[in-house]
Image (cartoon, rainbow, N blue to C red):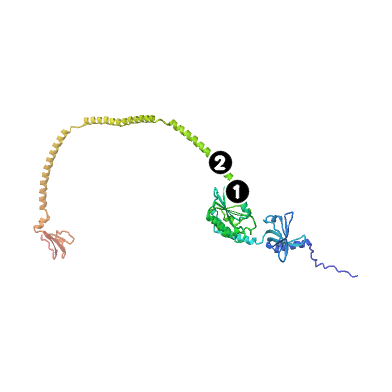
Amino acid sequence: MQTIPDADPGHAAPPVLTVTALNAQVARLLERSFPLTWIGGEISNFTRASSGHWYFTLKDDAAQVRAVMFRGRAQFAGFIPREGDKVEVRALVTLYGARGDYQINVEALRRAGVGALYEAFLRLKDKLTAQGLFDPDRKRALPMFTRSVGIVTSPQAAALRDVLTALQRRAPHLRIVLYPAPVQGQLAAQKIADAIATASHRAEVDVLLVVRGGGSIEDLWSFNEEVVARAIAGCSMPVIAGVGHETDFTIADFAADMRAATPTAAAELAATPRADWMASLSGDATDLRRAMRRMLSEANLNLDNYTRRLLSPSAQIGHQRLKLVALSTALTHAVRAPVNRHGFALAQLRARWARHRPDVRALRAELASQQRHCAASIASQLGQRRDALGALAAQLELLNPQRTLERGYAIVSDSRGKVLRSPDDIRIREALTVRLAEGTAEVGVASVQKALG
């Protein structure tokens, strides 16, 4: 009997995967290998489930892939795609494990080409922002009372009918001027800018509305051109931009002095309702009447007060005359009283002076006698002093050295000016100065001899 050998216990059999595990591993591999990426294609077999999820096929000329967009993402798409729409989706590549089908989970969806347009929109917005075109400081306030409104739009646009209806309902008194321009298509941007420039040049309206109804980003693209933004910024009157729906934003919205969510909202911003103005005027008239009544009442009260205080001219003159007499009396008294007082004081001082006044005649005689006696005494003293001075002058003349020199004597002095009196003061060969009566002489000493005793 032949037996089948047992399996080698050293070699374990490979694990057996279930289909679910296999699909889960493949799904994880796909998700790691393909991160979120943008994929372009055409919508096919679009289905919107009752749960709110979207199911469709994304295809191109050579291939297709199943796609799903769950309700939480689909509600932010901004539009519902239709069969044949060219779109771009931001999706995660994965595997639907229940069927083993490869598919993509869509996170975001946009119309084909919108990405490039949006990038161009952002680039232009950054450029004009850097140039200060959107600065809040340059935004102008709307006029308080609008008398005329200009509209830049297409005459066939539904937005024009909405604006006219809103203005007719709110402010039928307004004058409306239409500056026609195409709002989409080739060269539409330049024509819109030309219409804005025409309105600015004419300056015949108080506010200018630049409006257009809703549409795709391609439909609204004329309002994302730089030429339109610069025309709005250079307009001579305030500009309100009402382009698209509430969620739509264009470059024109940023350049305008005010943005409106819709064309109808732009019309509502441009003009205060007539009823509001009438109510405001009625309230102002009521306040004015009340103020006038109050002012008249106050004026009547003041008039009554002035009437009671008013005197007749004759009574006023009599009152002023009495006041003048009183003032004159007071002035006279004020002037005479000091004069009388000072006169009395002066009389008293004169009486006191008369009692104490000395007898000047005797004093004058005595003063004359003293003057004569003094003059005689001074003359006598001067004579005596003059005689004494003469005697002293004669004595002084006798002692004058010059007289001695005139009698033949001389004064001898050495080189230092010292007068020599003794032979001991003289040195041989010393130069001596000899002063004579009529000059000096320099002499040299040959020898010195002392007088014999």
- Residue plotted at (51% across, 38% down): 291
The extreme right residue here reads 1
Reading the image, the residue beneath label 2 is 283
- Rounded to the nearest whole Å, what is the CA distance between mark 2 and mark 1? 24 Å
| Residue drawn at x 15%, y 36% as measured from the top left | 367
> With 345 as the anchor, is 439 left or right in this view?
left
- Going by the picture, which residue comes out furthest to the bottom? 2
Q: Residues within 10 Å of mark 1 (few under 14, many from 20)?
A: some
Badge 2 crowding class, 10 Å Cα cut-off, few under 14, some 14 to 19, many 20 or more, is: few
Q: Amino acid at mark 2?
A: Gly
Q: Where's residue 365, x and y in %?
A: 14, 35
| Amino acid bearing label 1 | Gln
Q: Give the position of the C terminus as an image quadrant.
A: bottom left
- Where's residue 206, x and y in %? 54, 51
x and y percent of residue 27 in the render? 74, 62
Residue 283, located in which quarter of the rendered image?
A: top right
In the rendered image, the vertical position of residue 157 relative to residue 388, given as above or below: below
Q: Which residue is mark 1?
A: 168
In-front residue for pair 164/394? 164
- Tell which of 190 and 443 is nearer to you: 190
State the quadrant of the N terminus: bottom right
Secondary structure found at label 2 = helix
